[in-house]
Image (cartoon, helix red, strand yellow):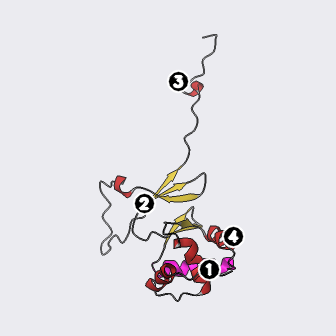
């Protein structure tokens, strides 16, 4: 089965200067077909496309995500050094990275506040600021840990 060629996906690809090939349309359908913002890894996108019945290799998914990024259709957010998550929302915005799940979501930009930024070195300007707020579950607090030392009946 091939991805339906819709005007939304075709226009999205053309906006980035990309030819709407079968593989690109299959990936674009999974990424923007319902109009929702997506955060995907190459592996998760590959699984979604395969589950829909489209045949696209993992190598093609990697190459196509990089082409989408280079065309300005997606952002690449690097987490944990070697892991990249691609975001379909291309304006500058902060992210939450859920460490326990390895998941990326948008963070509310209106709640972000910078008091000051460091002055860039001579001859340089700040091109972009990437904000990734890492989240993890709070450790459970037991009654024993609330007052420091553990109480015994001998005290």
The residue beneath circle 4 is 51
Query: What's the CA distance linking mark 4 and mark 1?
Result: 12 Å
| Predominant SS along the magenta part | helix
Taking 25 as reference, is 80 above or below it?
above
The residue beneath circle 2 is 94
Among the two numbered marks 2 and 4 on one chain, the one whose residue lies closer to the N terminus: 4
Left/right placement of residue 13 relative to residue 125 reads right
Looking at the rendering, the stretch of residues picked out in magenta corresponds to: 54-72
Taking 33 as reference, is 96 above or below it?
above
At which x and y percent is residue 65? 56, 77
Query: What's the CA distance linking mark 3 and mark 4?
Result: 52 Å
Left/right placement of residue 24 relative to residue 115 reads right
Taking 148 as reference, is 84 above or below it?
below
| Pick the front one: 36 or 144 | 36
At which x and y percent is residue 145? 57, 28
Label 3 or label 1, whichever lies nearer to me, is 1
Callout 3 crowding tier (Cα within 10 Å): few <14, some 14–19, many ≥20: few
Q: Residue at x 34, y 55 (%)?
A: 110
Among the two numbered marks 3 and 1 on one chain, the one whose residue lies closer to the N terminus: 1
As drawn, the label of residue 3 is 1
Among the two numbered marks 2 and 1 on one chain, the one whose residue lies closer to the N terminus: 1
Do the residues bearing badges 4 and 1 touch, measured as CB atoms within 8 Å?
no
């Amino acid at each position: 089965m091939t991805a339906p060629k819709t005007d939304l996906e075709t226009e999205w690809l053309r906006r980035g200067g990309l030819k709407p090939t079968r593989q690109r349309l299959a990936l674009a359908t999974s990424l923007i077909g319902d109009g929702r913002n997506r955060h995907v890894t190459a592996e998760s996108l590959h699984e979604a496309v395969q589950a829909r019945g489209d045949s696209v290799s993992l190598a093609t998914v990697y190459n196509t995500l990089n082409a989408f990024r280079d065309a300005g259709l997606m952002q690449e957010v690097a987490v944990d050094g070697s892991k990249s998550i691609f975001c379909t929302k291309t304006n500058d915005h902060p992210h939450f990275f859920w460490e326990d799940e390895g998941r990326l979501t948008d963070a509310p930009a209106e709640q972000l506040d910078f008091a000051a930024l460091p002055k860039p070195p001579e001859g340089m300007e700040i091109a972009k600021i990437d904000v990734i707020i890492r989240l993890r579950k709070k450790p459970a607090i037991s009654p024993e840990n609330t007052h420091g030392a553990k109480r015994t009946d001998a005290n």
